[in-house]
Image: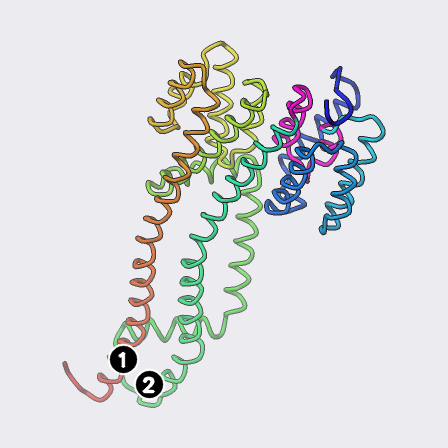
Amino acid sequence: HNMGYIPIKISPSSTGQKLSLSMRFSVSLPFSAISGAELLAFTQELSTLIKAGLPLDRTLSILVEITENEKLKKVVQEVLKDVRGGRSFSDALAQHPRFFDRLYVNMVKAGEAGGVLDIVLERLVDFLQRSQQLKSTILNAMIYPIILISVMAIVIVVMLMFVIPRFTMIFETMGKTIPLPTQILLSSSEVIKNFWWLILAVIIILSLSFQRYRNTERGRLVWDAFKLKIPLLRDLILKIEVARFSRTLGTLINSGVPLLGALTIVREVIKNVVVANSIADIGKGAKEGKGVSAPMRAVGVFPPLAMHMIRVGEETGKLDEMLIRVADTYDVDVQNTIKRFIAALEPLLILVMSFLVAFIVLSIIWAILSINDVTF
């Protein structure tokens, strides 16, 4: 094609087997070597140059020169070397699974096989942009609650460690009995002041232990299943995963990746293990000739609207288009759900913070009034 060469044969070999193993291993890696924004920028530049009609090797040479991330620059240099050595672009990318996941590699492979790499790269750019927008929506929504919780925690700790101890000395010199709420407050302050290091150590150990357990296969399953049992959180998680599932599957099918192969890749993109296992069941049903919508109903995880829209896509022969529409619908729904969730969470956090501060202040005032024999 306009890149100067066309792949004519793909066959299994020992190298291919090693590559497949490395690709499977990449799914378990906790962190990507580059951020989503950097991958999006790279793909946009790649798409623009390919669409302009430049040969692939010339395109990669330019990308080596303009890429600022040193790790990515080195990877692009190695990809360029492999391509000039006769390896296909997709195989060259697959050698670097921490930079280019299976979805990325398989879409490029489909574009090469069909001679439409420029079109596939445009779809890939759109997919990455939408995914990045969804991720940004979720992260931005979390910022204010995290700040509020942090401020609340700092205020409470400062009061218990530095303010309350001053009143403790005053109450001790008075030698009078103080109310139970004040006793609880003073005892809490004493424990935190004298054993803060032990409390911090316990929190760190428990956090690390939980993180380690959650990283196990069993731990991920238990934790993800637990999250789906919380009503509001379940609704949000399922909408996010449906949007991710639909956009990924629709993009892969539209790019020429076979349905069964696409479902395998989609399963690795899904974050929630329970939903990912459901997609595995969908793949089994599709392999048996049941399509996609029927197995989706059987697993009982996906919302009714998504299942009906996908069934219509199957019946009209436009499954890829309908999947993208489902993703667009749920992207908007996710944004609205997050706004409602944050709108409900903010006053709740403020109420909790106000209650704790009020409890501390009123406990001190009550004790002072009791010491001075003042009644309400």
Q: Residue furthest top?
A: 289
Q: Magenta stretch?
A: 90-116
Q: Residue furthest left?
A: 376
Q: Residue at x 61, y 28 (%)?
A: 120
Examine the rendered structure and indicate whether residue 318 appears above or below residue 60: above
Q: Which residue is mark 1?
A: 178
Image quadrant occupied by the N terminus: top right
Which residue type carries mark 2?
Phe
Q: How far apart are the alpha carbons under marks 2 and 1?
A: 8 Å
Q: Is residue 237 left or right of residue 208?
A: left
Q: Is residue 55 left or right of residue 304?
A: right
Q: Position of residue 199 (x, y in %)?
A: 50, 64
Q: Residue at x 35, y 44 (%)?
A: 336
Q: Position of residue 79 (x, y in %)?
A: 78, 36
179 and 5: which is toward the camera? 5
Element under label 2?
A: helix
Q: Is residue 115 left or right of residue 364?
A: right
| In magenta segment, residue 198 | no
Neighbourhood count class around disc 1 (C-alpha, 10 Å): few under 14, some 14–19, many 20 upward: some
Which residue type carries mark 1?
Ile
Labelled pair 2, 1 in contact (Cβ < 8 Å): yes
Q: Which residue is mark 2?
A: 171
